[in-house]
């Protein structure tokens, strides 16, 4: 049971790392002058909020 719990935590963190990478990619491409589609922009806004919320929650629970 313990391994299932830890695997779930690892999966959540990997998922968040993927989301953070997407946010970084989007911002880099946007600053480089590439035109993003409305769907990419909408997904960026949604994922960015998830990443920010995760970060705030993490630091509230674990300090700096």
Image (cartoon, rainbow, N blue to C red):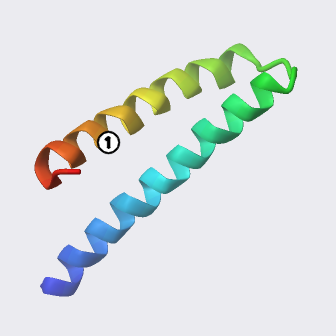
In this rendering, is residue 1 above or below 43? below
In this rendering, is residue 14 above or below 56? below
Tell me residue 33's x, y (percent): 87, 20
Q: Is residue 63 left or right of residue 45?
A: left
What residue appears at the point 16 percent right and 51 percent down from the top-left corner?
63
**Outermost residue toward the front?**
64
Quarter where residue 40 is shown: top right
Q: Residues within 10 Å of mark 1 (few under 14, many from 20)?
A: few
Q: Is residue 5 left or right of residue 29?
A: left
What residue appears at the point 30 percent right and 76 percent down from the top-left corner?
7
In this rendering, is residue 13 above or below 53? below
Closer to the camera, 26 or 60?
60
Tell me residue 45's x, y (percent): 51, 21
**How many numbered discs sit on the rendered protein?**
1
Q: Which residue is mark 1?
A: 55
What residue appears at the point 51 percent right and 45 percent down from the top-left corner?
19
What residue appears at the point 45 percent right and 62 percent down from the top-left corner?
14
Closer to the camera, 3 or 24?
24
Tell me residue 51's x, y (percent): 40, 38
Tell me residue 42's x, y (percent): 57, 18
Closer to the camera, 62 or 39?
62
Q: Is residue 34 left or right of residue 27?
A: right
Q: Is residue 27 left or right of residue 18?
A: right
Secondary element at tag 1: helix
Quarter where residue 28 is shown: top right
Where is the N terminus found, in terms of image quarters? bottom left
In this rendering, is residue 47 above or below 42? below
């Amino acid at each position: 049971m313990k391994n299932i719990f830890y695997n779930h935590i690892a999966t959540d963190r990997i998922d968040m790392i993927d989301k953070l990478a997407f946010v970084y990619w989007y911002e880099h491409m946007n600053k480089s002058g590439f035109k993003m589609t409305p769907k990419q922009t909408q997904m960026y806004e949604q994922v960015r909020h998830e990443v920010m919320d995760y970060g705030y929650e993490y630091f509230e629970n674990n300090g700096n």
